[in-house]
């Protein structure tokens, strides 16, 4: 099975499994626009939105920002993570769009360890305007450019293995 488009990265590192790229951002930084472009550049691919798993709760839903929503948010993230890695172990390249707290990476790392599928972590951040934090780390991509340019930047980083997240 061909897991890449021409010039596209194989996220799984050639081990038979696909891989998962987590595209995280603060609200409005561009993941909703960039994630589909990224998924369209990978083959075969799946685009999941972690927020959809939380919104699937019908009775007992609590607004995500409230303190009492912690268990709900953790459960929804665990479900999205398990779905992403299930697709990855089936050979798909998965783009998981999420707004994550840094401690949520432990859930993703654990699933990567269990399944053997690689995990890439990309944080989209709006431009370096006044008041922005210092220099970005290696997992951060500036979204000041058009979404297509940002998607190409992310793909280039995936190709180099720049966003790999270890266990």
Image (cartoon, helix red, strand yellow):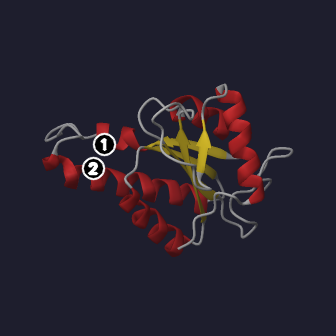
Using residue 1 as the reference point, say whether residue 154 is left or right of it: left
> Residue 54 shows which numbered tag?
1
- Could you tell me if the residues under marks 2 and 1 are in contact, i.e. CB atoms within 8 Å? yes
Looking at the image, is 144 positioned above or below residue 15? Answer: above
Secondary structure of residue under mark 1: helix
Residue 167 location in percent, x, y?
Answer: 53, 74
> Residue 37 shows which numbered tag?
none
Frontmost residue, 37 versus 153: 153
Q: Residue furthest front?
A: 130
Q: Residue furthest right?
A: 6
Using residue 60 as the reference point, say whether residue 15 is left or right of it: right
Residue 164 sits in quarter: bottom right
Residue 42 location in percent, x, y?
Answer: 72, 44
* Residue identifier under label 2: 73
Q: How many marks?
A: 2
Using residue 147 as the reference point, say whether residue 69 is left or right of it: left
Residue 146 location in percent, x, y?
Answer: 66, 25
Q: Nearer the viewer, mark 2 or mark 1?
A: 2
Secondary structure of residue under mark 2: helix
Find the distance from the CA under tag 2 to the CA under tag 1: 7 Å
Residue 155 sits in quarter: top right
Name the quadrant of the N terminus.
bottom right
Residue 149 location in percent, x, y?
Answer: 72, 31
Q: Residue at x 72, y 41 (%)?
A: 153
Looking at the image, is 22 positioned above or below residue 66? Answer: below
Looking at the image, is 119 positioned above or below residue 15? Answer: above
Q: Residue at x 58, y 37 (%)?
A: 35
């Amino acid at each position: 099975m061909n897991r890449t488009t021409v010039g596209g990265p194989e996220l799984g590192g050639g081990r038979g499994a696909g891989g998962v790229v987590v595209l995280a951002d603060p609200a409005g930084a561009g993941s909703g626009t960039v994630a589909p472009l990224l998924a369209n550049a990978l083959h075969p691919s799946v685009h999941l939105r972690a927020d959809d798993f939380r919104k699937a709760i019908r009775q007992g839903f609590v607004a995500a920002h409230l303190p009492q929503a912690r268990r709900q948010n953790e459960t929804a993230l665990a479900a999205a993570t398990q779905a992403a890695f299930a697709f990855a172990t089936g050979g798909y390249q998965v783009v998981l769009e999420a707004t994550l707290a840094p401690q949520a990476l432990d859930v993703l790392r654990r699933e990567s360890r269990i399944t053997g599928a690689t995990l890439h972590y990309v944080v989209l951040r709006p431009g370096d305007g006044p008041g922005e934090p210092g220099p970005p780390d290696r997992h951060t991509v500036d979204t000041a450019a058009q979404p297509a340019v940002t998607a190409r930047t992310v793909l280039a980083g995936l190709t180099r293995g720049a966003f790999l997240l270890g266990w």
